[in-house]
Amino acid sequence: MEQHSRALRVMVVDDSKTIRHTAETLLEQAGCEVITAVDGFDALAHLADHQPRVVFIDVMMPRLDGYQACQLIKQNARFSGTSVIMLSSREGLFDRARARAVGADRFLTKPFDRVSLLEAIRAEVPDFQPSPL
């Protein structure tokens, strides 16, 4: 039972309130502790305080986009081990290549569902055991 006392901490960064709420609900149902942020600056401000293991971050956001935020996370020695999963409504090769270039660990196309979110997490955190529905 000890493993459930420490929920996997996940951050969801998206300027869409609907996307943030959907991801937060699905991840909390799976037993994750979820922190949300509205853009890249907000995410960076919360990163040190909450130290999530996985960050889902939207590509297109105002102020600081997902690519810029991912690059800053991965260049910081303290957070370079944080898994960053890019979210985008576009599935082009250019977007995927740019995500890899800035250090993203995965790329997930919107709209996503519970299964795709959990598969992305499990690929980064193999010992993650989601709560059953």
Image (tube, helix red, strand yellow):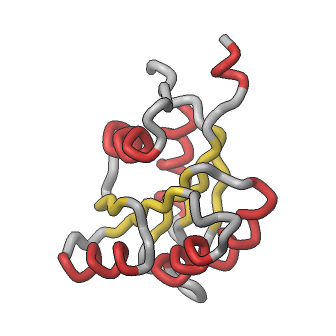
Q: Give the quarter of the image for residue 62.
A: bottom right
Which residue appears farthest toward the right when viewing the image?
A: 49
- The furthest residue to the left: 93
> Which residue of the protein is positioned furthest toward the top in this rendering?
1
**Relative image position of residue 80 (x, y in whole percent):** 59, 66
Eyeballing the image, is 132 above or below 89?
Answer: above
Q: Position of residue 108 (x, y in %)?
A: 33, 59
**Quadrant for the C terminus in the image:** top left
User: For residue 86, what is the image quadrant?
Assistant: bottom left
**Residue 30 sits above or below residue 56 on the image:** above
Q: Position of residue 18 (x, y in %)?
A: 49, 58
Q: Residue at x 44, y 72 (%)?
A: 103
Judge from the rendering whether residue 111 lies leftward or rightward of residue 60; answer left or right: left
Residue 68 on image: x %, y %: 52, 84
Residue in the picture at 48% in, 40% down: 125
Q: Residue at x 56, y 78 (%)?
A: 69
Answer above or below: position of 57 versus 21.
Answer: below
Q: Nearer the viewer, residue 17 or 97?
A: 97
